Amino acid sequence: MRGGKRTRSKKKGDKLERQNSPDMEDAQSSVSSVSSQQDSADTMRSVLQEIRDFRAEHKVDLNKLKEEIKGDMKSELEDMKQEIYQKLSANSVLTQAYETRLKEAEERIDEAETVNMAMSDALIKSMKEQRAMQGKLVDLEGRSRRNNMRIYGVPEEKEDSSRQDAHSLGLGNTHIRQCARCSAGAEEERFLRGDTRPQRFGAVPGDGASPPDQDMAACRREECRWDRDREQSKEEATRV
């Protein structure tokens, strides 16, 4: 009987084991799936932590790099700014020097123009004086070619290259001697009157000037004598 009970209990255990085997498999599979999910979650956590650590580390490096780049750019900009300021200062100094030189050049040009105008005026004046002196020189040269004798009443003209004498004017030696006596008498009369002033040289009578007043009467008398003598000489020439 005991043997029969054991077999029965064994059979019941086998039957129960057969009934519970699928449930056990399901439980094992669920446990394995849970463990695998937990492993994957742990893996994800570790990956995320590594990423966070990497980002934090590189964030610090990036901040340092940014600060370094910012400092370098700032120093370079300061240097460039200083260099530009120095160049601008040098250019302003050069510009001021050029402006000063340009102002001096303009002043010199103005002075040169003023001097040029003054020199032009002086040149024109000197040319006028030269022409006047040339006219006087021609007049003096013409006077020096004469015999230094003034014959009042006889018109004088400008002499040509050919020399003119008293005979070409229709005068004889008698008239010349009478004119000389007239001039000597006039000088003697002036001396007796006490007039010792030098006789003024004027233009020749042919140029429109008149002889001095004190000699007018004597010269007119002599002119009348010359006319009478000239008429007599003409009459004698016609008779011959």
Image (cartoon, rainbow, N blue to C red):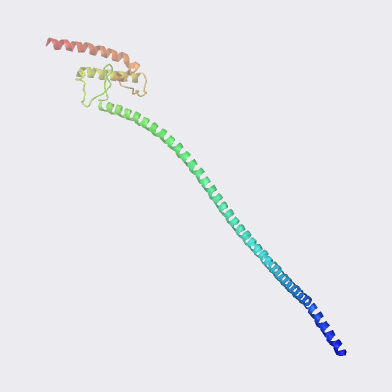
Image height of 100 relative to 21, above or below: above
Residue at left offset 64%, top offset 60%: 70
Residue at left offset 34%, top offset 16%: 214
Give the farthest residue toward the left: 240
Quadrant position of residue 57: bottom right
Image height of 11 relative to 157, above or below: below
Give coordinates of residue 7: x percent, y percent.
83, 87
Q: Horizontally, is 151 left or right of 29 in the view?
A: left
Give coordinates of residue 193: x percent, y percent.
36, 18
Q: Horizontally, is 166 left or right of 19 in the view?
A: left
* Front one among 131 and 35: 35
Quadrant position of residue 49: bottom right
Q: Horizontally, is 27 left or right of 76 in the view?
A: right
Image height of 103 relative to 154, above or below: below
Residue at left offset 23%, top offset 13%: 226
Pick the quarter of the image with the C terminus: top left
Give coordinates of residue 221: x percent, y percent.
28, 12
Pick the quarter of the image with the N terminus: bottom right
